């Protein structure tokens, strides 16, 4: 799945997945840029394609949060994970995959609950409420 990413981001993520203890802030910024870039393309690319582009970032965040990432970087990884799962939940909703959408929103809410800033939780719940209202 990493083949879908830009070469520099791909290299940094590969290195972080091989050795999570060596994860750097630039790696997390690369993951965040993937999420921002996918979000910027909503409305101009098919939702399924956007889901495919976002999948490596989501899976990388999951693995990094399970691995021994340096303690000061965990909140940043968690923030990217929340943003990625929230966006992916919306994209899953748009493709009529309600089961995946609910699971992704639940994952985003769980990770947001572990962050100090409560606005992350509010953001996840608002996005989920809006897609539920739209449904």
Image (cartoon, helix red, strand yellow):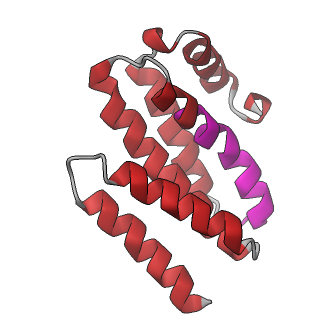
Judge left or right: residue 124 versus residue 131.
left
Q: Residue at x 44, y 32 (%)?
A: 29
Residue 123: name its quadrant: bottom left
| Residue 40 can be seen in this image | no
Q: Main secondary structure of the magenta part?
A: helix
* Residue 14 drawn above or below residue 97: above
Which quadrant: the N terminus? top right
State the count of labels: 0
Q: Residue at x 51, y 40 (%)?
A: 33
Residue 109 in view in this figure: yes
**What's the residue at 76%, 36% (across, down)?**
4
In the rendered image, residue 3, in percent from the top left (x then y), is placed at 79, 29
Q: Which residues are magenta?
A: 44-61
Indicate yes or no whether the magenta region holds residue 94: no
Vertical order, 36 against 122 (above or below): above
Residue toward you, 103 or 135: 103
Q: Report the front residue among 107 and 88.
A: 107
Q: Is residue 81 left or right of residue 41?
A: left
Instruction: Work out whether 35 lies above or below 106.
Output: above
- In this view, the residue in front, 101 or 10, is 101
User: Percent position (x, y) of residue 14?
Assistant: 65, 17
Image location (x, y in percent) of residue 119: 25, 62
Q: Position of residue 34 (x, y in %)?
A: 58, 42
Task: Specify the quadrant of the image occupied by residue 90.
Answer: bottom right
Whether 22 is drawn above or below 76: the answer is above
Q: Residue at x 59, y 22 (%)?
A: 13
User: Nearest the camera: 3 or 82?
Assistant: 82
> Does 52 appear in magenta?
yes
């Amino acid at each position: 799945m990493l083949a879908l990413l830009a070469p520099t981001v791909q290299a940094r993520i590969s290195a972080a997945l091989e050795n999570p203890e060596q994860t750097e802030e630039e790696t997390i910024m690369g993951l965040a840029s993937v999420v921002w870039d996918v979000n910027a393309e909503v409305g101009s690319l098919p939702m399924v394609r956007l889901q495919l582009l976002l999948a490596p970032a989501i899976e990388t965040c999951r693995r990094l949060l399970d691995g021994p990432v340096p303690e000061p970087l965990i909140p940043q990884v968690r923030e990217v994970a929340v943003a990625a799962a929230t966006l992916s939940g919306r994209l899953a909703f748009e493709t009529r995959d309600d089961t995946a959408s609910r699971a992704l929103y639940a994952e985003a809410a769980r990770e947001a609950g572990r962050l100090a800033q409560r606005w992350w939780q509010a953001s996840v719940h608002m996005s989920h409420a809006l897609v539920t209202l739209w449904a």
